[in-house]
Amino acid sequence: MNNYNNDKNSNSKNYYETLKVSIDAPYEEIKKSYRKLVLLYHPDKISNDHSSFNSDSGNVANKEFNEIQKSWETLKDDALRKQYDALLLEQQRQKYSVSDEVDLDDMEYLEEEGQYTYPCRCGDQYIITEDQLSEGNDVVCCSGCSLSIKIIYEVEN
Ligand SMILES: [Zn+2]
């Protein structure tokens, strides 16, 4: 069986991309898209269409079909979907390149809001709350652009 860097591929394509829906698509829309894709990629259909066995297109279609199934199993379930969304968000956050490291002492502290802010070069600002910090978050995305900073601070226990 050929591998085709399958692990890499399945990692780079998220479940929403596999099902060709947007990340905030409602359940009904995902279901519709899933049904359409299943018809397209169903192994039975592929082997009927192509008379040659073990063809590469058959293997690829099979993998695609498995991905579609896996994606659907997760996204159709509200609780699983929420879990997956959180994971996805975390992955995306890590993908953002950290443009700078900022000492927490250099950030402006807004006592009323319980927030720390730092100006971004785009004119907008980075905002992190004390709660986020205490949960161990140290990377903040700018509210106005895709830049992010890493906050350096001492962990107090
Ligand atoms: Zn910015």
Image: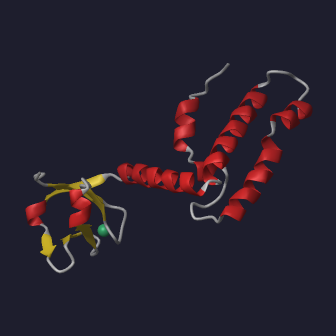
- Residue found at x 90% / y 34%: 49
Q: Position of residue 18 (x, y in %)?
A: 64, 48
Looking at the picture, the colour scheme in use is secondary structure
- Determine the residue located farthest toward the top in the rendered image: 1
Which residue corresponds to the image point at 12% horizontal and 61% vertical from the top-left?
104
34 shown above or below 143: above
> In the rendered view of the protein, which quadrant contains the N terminus?
top right
Q: Residue at x 69, y 37 (%)?
A: 66
Residue drawn at 79 percent across, 24 percent down: 55
Q: Is residue 68 left or right of residue 81?
A: right
Position of residue 59 relative to residue 22, above or below, is above
Q: Nearer the viewer, residue 81 or 61?
A: 81
Work out which residue is located at the far bottom of the displayed protein and give it: 112
Relative depth, front residue between 80 and 71: 80
Q: Residue 116: horizontal and vertical position, in percent?
A: 18, 70
- In the visual, does 22 lie left or right of 28? left
| 96 in relation to 52, above or below | below
Residue 140 image-quadrant placement: bottom left
**Where in the figure is residue 80, as x and y percent of width and height?**
55, 51
